[in-house]
Amino acid sequence: QVQLVESGGGLVQAGGSLRLSCAASGRTFSRNAMGWFRQAPGKEREFVAASTWSGGSTYYADSVKGRFTISRDNAKNTVYLQMNSLKPEDTAVYYCAASSRTIVVRITTEGQYDYWGQGTQVTVSS
């Protein structure tokens, strides 16, 4: 059974940093795209960041560019999201996602991902 388990969320003041981790089990994703999405209260889930299987290409939502960094350790089957200069508008439940595809054409799209974590809450106070 495939599982993605996020950790590292919490409460932080504006301007602070958090590092989210997503550990996968049940299969290896070393040849698969992985990403992060988030959902704020009353809003739809939105794309945050994604990485190709090698980590050689990364993609970010405009709202987080320059502040968030996605990385992965394929040996550990884990993907990370380093979040710096956090803003209150970053408050959301953050979800890790993994694709069963090696090549993902629309890597920023939810439908390209087949496995999802349960989410971790990130709250940024002003």
Image (cartoon, rainbow, N blue to C red):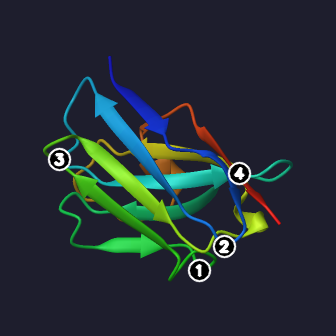
The amino acid pointed to by label 3 is Ser
User: Residue 41 location, x and y as percent?
Assistant: 83, 48
Q: CA distance from mark 1 to mark 4?
A: 16 Å
Q: Which mark is residue 15?
A: 2
Q: Residue at x 21, y 72 (%)?
A: 56
Q: Name the residue beneath numbered marker 1.
A: 62
Q: Name the residue beneath numbered marker 3.
A: 30
- For residue 9, above or below residue 13: above
For the question of whether residue 108 can be seen, the reply is no
Q: CA distance from mark 3 to mark 1?
A: 26 Å
Q: Residue at x 43, y 51 (%)?
A: 112
Q: Residue at x 27, y 62 (%)?
A: 52
Q: Which mark is residue 92?
A: 4
Who comes first in sequence, dot 2 or dot 3?
A: 2
Tell me: 52 left or right of 48: left
For the question of whether residue 123 can be seen, the reply is yes
- The answer to whether the residue labelled 1 contacts the one labelled 2, judged by CB atoms less than 8 Å apart, is no
- For residue 43, above or below residue 67: above
The amino acid pointed to by label 2 is Gly
